Image (spheres, rainbow, N blue to C red):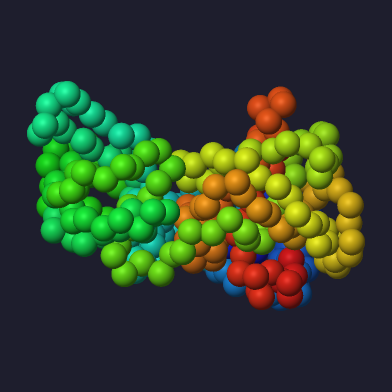
Amino acid sequence: MKLLGCPNIIVAVNKLDLLDFDEGKYQAITAAYQKLAQQIGLNADVHFLPISALKGDNIVNASAQTPWYQGLPLLPLLESLPVSRKDALAQAAHFPVQRVARQDGSSSDDFRGYQGRLEAGRLKVGDAVKVLPNGQTAKIAEIYNPNGKTDTAEAGEVLTITLDTDIDISRGNAIVAADSPIEPSQQFQAALCWFDDIPLNLRRKYLLKHTTQTTAVKISETAYVWDVNTLSQVQSATELKLNDIGHISFKTQQPLNTTTYEQNQATGAFILIDEATNHTVAAGMIREGDEAGTFEI
C-alpha cells in the first residue's frame, strides 16, 4: 500500500461474529495494524471498521451488534472517499499519444489528430506545447473530447488534439506543456513487483510498456529485494521470484518521458512483458535515484 501511494486504506475486520462482537478484541486487532502502519511510515488515512459478512453487519447499514462503533458502514464509507486527481491537475500538461488519426491524408489540408488521455495538467486552445522526445514546439489548434469540440481539457479526459504545425508524431511520443520539466531518459530506477511463476532472468529479453510506448529494456542491476516478513532488505539478490518486490535499475532502448510514481501514478508506472511468452511478468513504480537507495517498504 505504501508503494502504491494509496491516500485512503480501509481495514475491515471481518468475522467479528466469531468473537461475539467483542470491542476489546477488535481494538487489539486495530492497534496491531496501527503499529504496523507506523513502523513502515504509511502516509495514508487508515479507516478501521468492524464487520461480519455472514449476516451483513456494517456492510450496508449500521449493525445493532456493534453499538460501540460510531463510524460509517463499509459501502457508505467507500462512497464517501474522494476520487479526484487534484495532484495531477496541478502539474504541467502531459499527453501521451496513443494514436494518430488521419483523414484525407493525400490532401494538403488533411486532418491530423493526436489521440490519447491527458495524464496531467490542463490544456486549452492556443497553449504552447512541445513534443517529446524530439523537443519540437507548436501550439494547440483544436481539442476534441467524446462530446465534440472544446476549448479546454484537464487530467483524466480522453482527447483528440490538433496542432498548428505539422510535426512527425507517432504512438509513444508525448505532447507536454512548453515549460514541462520532463526530460526523456533511457535510465531509471524502480520498485518492481514480480508476477510470474518464472523468476526474473537477467539474460532473458523483456519489453517495457510505459504509458503508450513499448520498448526493449535491459535490467542492469538488482540492488536488493524486500523481505515483507521482516521488512528488511536482502542485498545483492540475483533473482526476483513470484510476489517479490525489488529495487531494480533499468536501461531502455528508446528514451521514455517519465516522472516518478510519487509525482504522477500514470506516468510513473510501467509493466514488464516477457518477449518470448508475451506474459505480463511484473509491474514497476519509478523512483528518484537518490530516493530509491534509501527507500524502505
Residue drawn where x is 69% and y is 43% of the image: 282
**Visible in this render: residue 80?**
no
Residue closer to the observer: 211 or 39: 211
Is 40 rendered above or below residue 279? below
In the figure, residue 297 lies in which quadrant? bottom right
Furthest toward the left, the residue is 109
Residue drawn where x is 13% and y is 58% of the image: 126
Drawn side of residue 9 relative to residue 119, left or right = right
Indicate the position of residue 66 as horizontal and vertical percent values: 62, 58
Indicate the position of residue 167 as horizontal and vertical percent values: 26, 45
Residue drawn where x is 66% and y is 74% of the image: 291
Residue closer to the observer: 35 or 1: 1
Report the label total.
0
Residue closer to the observer: 238 or 265: 238
Indicate the position of residue 96 as horizontal and vertical percent values: 39, 47
In the figure, residue 123 lies in which quadrant? bottom left
For the N terminus, give its image quadrant: bottom right
Drawn side of residue 59 relative to residue 100, left or right = right
Residue drawn where x is 71% and y is 58% of the image: 249
Is 7 rendered above or below residue 115? below
**Visible in this render: residue 111?**
yes
Indicate the position of residue 88 as horizontal and vertical percent values: 39, 62
Residue closer to the observer: 198 or 33: 198
